[in-house]
């Protein structure tokens, strides 16, 4: 039987709720990608070019430090990776998670939450950045989350 993990980054709680519902729907373990320093409301102000999220997202090399450097992914066949879409892509904390952990040989299913962005550009960006990984598009999750994500 395939062992599954739902891992997610959530700055305001929206993606966390979707991830919890997804984990329950697909029978997966749950893991939060937590930044070493939590994001404040001011950090998340995308209208302020000097806010933490704006500064990070405007620097393609930015890799925010995580509270947990490595995550034990051994034994998982499918890893769902979820995040809110920022600037049409995954927040750079997700890149930190991918680069800090061994995801080779695992099926990676991307899901996201968004107020208006589409999932495909974010998935394409991850596929281009990590061509050696098996990254697949899942769904944007909002409302009732069901197990038919892929």
Image (cartoon, rainbow, N blue to C red):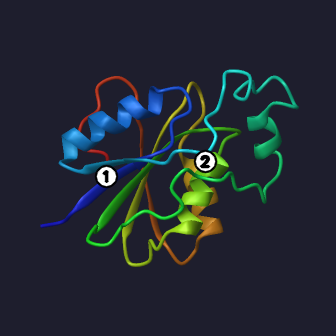
24 displayed left or right of 134? left
Q: Position of residue 60 (x, y in %)?
A: 78, 56
Residue 89 position, x and y percent, is 64, 46
The residue labelled by disc 1 is 150
The residue sitting at 28% across, 67% down in the picture is: 76
Looking at the image, residue 45 lies above or below residue 98: above
Q: Compared to 99, does 105 lie above or below?
A: below
Please tell me which residue is depicted at 68% across the width and 51% down the height of the picture: 64
Q: Which mark is residue 9?
A: none
Question: In front: 143, or 64?
Answer: 64
For the residues bearing labels 2 and 1, Cβ distance under 8 angstroms: no
- State the image coordinates of residue 1 (x, y, percent, origin top left): 12, 67
Residue 132 location (% of width, % of height): 53, 78
Name the residue rendered at 38%, 78% in the picture.
105
Circle nearer the viewer, 2 or 1 = 2
Look at mark 2 in the image and give the residue it sits on.
90
């Amino acid at each position: 039987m395939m062992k599954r993990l739902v891992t997610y980054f959530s700055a305001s709680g929206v993606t966390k709720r979707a991830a919890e519902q997804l984990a329950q729907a697909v029978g997966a373990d749950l893991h939060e990608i937590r930044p070493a320093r939590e994001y404040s409301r001011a950090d998340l102000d995308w209208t302020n070019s000097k806010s933490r999220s704006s500064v990070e997202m405007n620097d393609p090399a930015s890799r925010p430090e995580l509270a947990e450097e490595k995550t034990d992914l051994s034994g998982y066949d499918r890893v769902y990776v979820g995040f809110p879409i920022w600037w049409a892509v995954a927040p750079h904390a997700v890149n930190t998670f991918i680069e800090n952990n061994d995801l080779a040989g695992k099926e990676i299913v991307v899901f996201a939450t968004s107020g208006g962005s589409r999932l495909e550009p974010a998935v394409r960006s991850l596929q281009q950045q990590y061509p050696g990984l098996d990254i697949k598009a899942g769904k944007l999750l909002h409302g009732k989350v069901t197990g038919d994500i892929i």
